[in-house]
Image: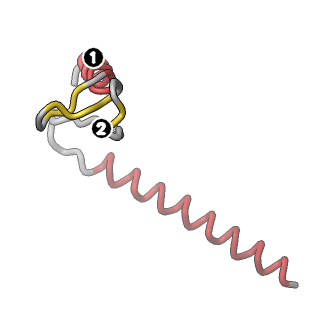
Amino acid sequence: MKKIWISIVGVVVIIGLIFLGFTQLNKSTASGSSDKKTIAIGTTGVSFPNSYKKGSKLVGFDVDLTNQAAKKIGI
């Protein structure tokens, strides 16, 4: 009986996470009424030479790669 409840709770949690993911995806695609496009990239900013801070600016391979990819797709 305990295994059944654990399974039911697990399925409910998974369904909830999937629903939350779809609602967040819908918000991010529906709220873009302006012409401005944005790319969100995650990087640590402390892993030389991939990305590091030079003064107050983030530079390095990750930044260069992201800029080139954005340029190629027109952002």
Mark 2 lies on a secondary structure that is loop
Q: Residue sitting at 56 percent across and 67 percent down?
A: 16
Disc 1 or disc 2, which is closer to the eye? 2
Q: In front: 3, or 18?
A: 3
Q: Residue furthest left?
A: 55
Q: Residue sitting at 52 percent across and 62 percent down?
A: 19
Q: Is residue 67 above or below residue 39?
A: above
| Quadrant position of the N terminus in the picture | bottom right
- The residue under label 1 is 68
Q: Quadrant of residue 46?
A: top left
Give, as a three-letter code, the residue at label 2. Gly
Mark 1 lies on a secondary structure that is helix
The residue carrying pointer 2 sits among few (fewer than 14), some (14 to 19) or many (20 or more) residues within 10 Å by Cα, namely: some
Mark count: 2
75 vs 46, left or right, is: left
Question: Label for residue 12?
Answer: none
Q: In front: 18, or 62?
A: 62
Q: In front: 33, or 58?
A: 58
Label 1 to label 2: alpha-carbon separation:
18 Å
Q: Is residue 52 above or below residue 15?
A: above
- The residue under label 2 is 45
Residue 31, horizontal then vertical, whole percent:
25, 51
N-terminal of the two: label 1 or label 2?
2
| Quadrant position of the C terminus in the picture | top left
2 vs 62, left or right, is: right
Give, as a three-letter code, the residue at label 1. Gln
